[in-house]
Image (spheres, helix red, strand yellow):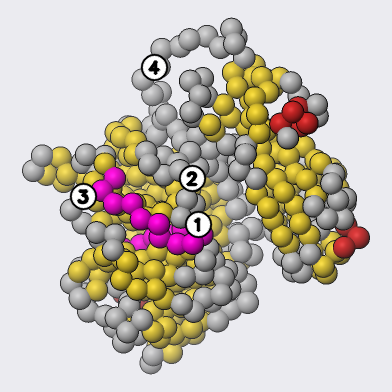
Amino acid sequence: MAERLQGHAPATWVNDAKKWDFDCINERFRFCRYAPSQQFHIHQDGVFHRLTAPEGARSFLTFMIYLNDGDEFVGGDTLFYADGLGATKNTDGDGLNIIARVRPQVGSLILFDHSVWHAGEMVTAGVKHIMRSDVLYKPTCGTMPVVTPAAPSSAFTPAHQGYIWTLTALQRIEGDALASCIASGGRDKVIRLWSAQGAPMQALHGHTQSVLGLAPLLEGKLASVSRDRSLKIWNIATGQCAVSVAAHESAVLCVCAFVRDTEQRIATGGADSQVKLWNTEGVQQSTLNGHTGWVWDIAPMVRAGEGATVSEDGDIATVSEDGDIAIWNTLTLQRTHRLAGNVPLRTLVVAENGRIIISGDMNGNILMWVLKDRHWRVTASIRAHTAAVRRLRLLSPILLASAGEDNQLRLWRIEAEFAAEFALVAQAAFSHSNFVTDAMAVDGGCLSCSYDGEIKKWQC
């Protein structure tokens, strides 16, 4: 296939004043099926890096082949835009400058720059099938001067190669003391450790696909999950992977640590719609079934140190593509509450020691649920972003960060109102050049990471 594609792709590519030669295609083909009401919202494609070759290789182009004809479904055109979501307040792209519209034809190929904003229009009837992958280039021989690596010129460099999916704070054992550090996981399959000031400390290698979730554990350990379907447990002091298990039948999308009966446990959620429970040695203890879509996020209902006994109302909460929030009792393995919705959910946080759940959905909305007399009800609903909410994080007990696919990081204050109700009040907004994927609190402010491959610090 590479030989056939080579006749259509540029033989060379220039990027940042460097010349690259056509190398190959990414053999990891992605096959996508779009049923009625499904679409791919406006986005840019990420760079794929191949690190095995001495000089390295990276992708600049996406190629996509339509596997069935547009006569077999309604909608489903591929749309290309002049600008991204950061330039509009409309989630679906109406009002954006559409520069091209492609109607699928079976067997036809489209080839485009990763940086071009594009979307798959909603399919309203029938089913659309495509295959896509990337075109890789390698540095042109003789044009890439040998450079001795210099000391990083700024914090959080050298950066991840490609998207950064997740951030977390860690306690690293140094001698007889604990030192704070930061961990980040990216599409380059690497977990990077940083000092509180952003100086590189360590890189953990072992995952074979994107690192999607991180959770700090006791005794200087770290749990990580990946699109490679594995759960890994790392010894931070040595940088060694102590445990690696095949955790789910599909990509593992999220991980969290929680306390049950005074012992720390691990929960993972996957694209197989399951939630699995583990001990900190990586031994699976049980499976929670109930979601009908991808499980995107998990949060403990009680913060570590605030309680160790399983509540009858549940000790972990999950959100899913099926639109539901589920609260689970991990001792009885029962779903104690189902907070039903009709919009796919991406993320959640728990506040007020289990009395408040805040969720973020695909349409950019944040909903606040409050528990009263063992019943949950929505007390606030805000259109927080003009595209999907990727991540919610509590920066403090009353300060919430929301990361959006509109390239914005937004801060909200949780404020108590009359009759013990709660509301979200907007505080600030910060921008990246692509989707914001995660955030975390640090001294003097917060950090955020993005599809643009950057970790930024903000005063807040």
**Picture quadrant where residue 361 is located:** bottom right
Residue linked to disc 4: 150
- Is the Cβ of the residue at disc 3 closer than 8 Å to that at disc 1? no
- Is the Cβ of the residue at disc 1 closer than 8 Å to that at disc 2? yes
Q: Earlier in the sequence, mark 2 or mark 4?
A: 4
Residue linked to disc 1: 251
Residue drawn where x is 63% and y is 77% of the image: 342
**Picture quadrant where residue 65 is located:** top right
Q: Residue furthest left?
A: 176
> Where does the N terminus fall, quadrant-wise?
top right
Q: Nearer the viewer, residue 59 or 285?
A: 285
x, y percent for residue 416: 40, 76
The number of discs equals 4
Disc 4 residue type (three-letter): Ala
Residue linked to disc 2: 209
Residue 220 image label: 3
Disc 1 residue type (three-letter): Ala
Q: Residues within 10 Å of mark 3 (few under 14, many from 20)?
A: some
Q: Earlier in the sequence, mark 2 or mark 3?
A: 2
The secondary element bearing badge 4 is classed as: loop
